[in-house]
Image (cartoon, rainbow, N blue to C red):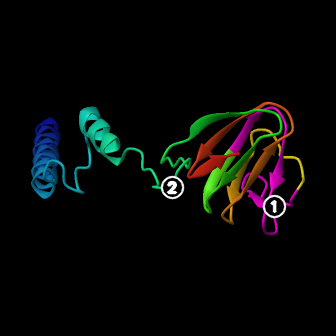
Amino acid sequence: MEKKIAIVVIILTVLTVGIFKAGMVAGAATSEAGSSGDPLITKSYLDERLASLGDTSSGASGTKTSADYKKVTLNKGSALYADAGTEVVLYTGNAKAVSNGDGIINITKGELTANGISLGKYCSYLIPASQSGISAISECVVFVKGGYTIK
């Protein structure tokens, strides 16, 4: 009886090791390093790719455009007019919406902020129409992603 159990254990062990080895070989054969089957990348490669995206700028005088958020300080009474599609986040201070259309979109709350209405701190706003934006009620800091002009 013990001999039969020992033979069964040996056979099961050999089969398990064989299946495991075959799976490793099959898995290694299907993915080439760097391919979509093996998407692991190095930090240096990622840094290089992100640096190549960089900032873009428009040709208009006094207009700034960025692919990243830029910290902008607005003095009391000044206004930031943005290109359509620009994102603005009020970080400190008080500001109100300035729009040549229906208003600006509060992405955080999913609602429209009409012309002249105060902005909520830490909310993200999308500027849907060119030359709409925000006006500083007090000195404020905003983060801007996209094209804008300060007046």
Residue identified by numbered label 2: 60
Task: Find residue 114 and report its image quarter.
Answer: bottom right
- Front residue of 61 and 9: 61
- Kindly identify the residue that appears in the image at 83 percent across and 39 percent down: 77
Amino acid marked by disc 1: Glu
- Give how far across and how far down residue 133 sits, in percent: 73, 53
- Kindly identify the residue that appears in the image at 9 percent across and 54 percent down: 29
Give the side of residue 139 with respect to residue 63, left or right: right
Amino acid marked by disc 2: Ala
Q: Earlier in the sequence, mark 2 or mark 1?
A: 2
Helix, strand or loop status at disc 2 = loop
C-alpha gap between disc 2 and disc 1: 31 Å
- Give how far across and how far down residue 140 sits, in percent: 77, 32
Task: Find residue 10 and report its image quarter.
Answer: top left
Residue identified by numbered label 1: 111
Q: Badge 2: few (under 14), some or many (20 or more) residues near its Cα, within 10 Å?
A: few
The quarter of the image holding the N terminus is top left
- Front residue of 22 and 111: 111
What residue range appears in magenta? 89-115
- Kindly identify the residue that appears in the image at 69 percent across and 52 percent down: 81
Marks 2 and 1 close (CB-CB < 8 Å) = no
- Give how far across and how far down residue 151 sits, in percent: 71, 45
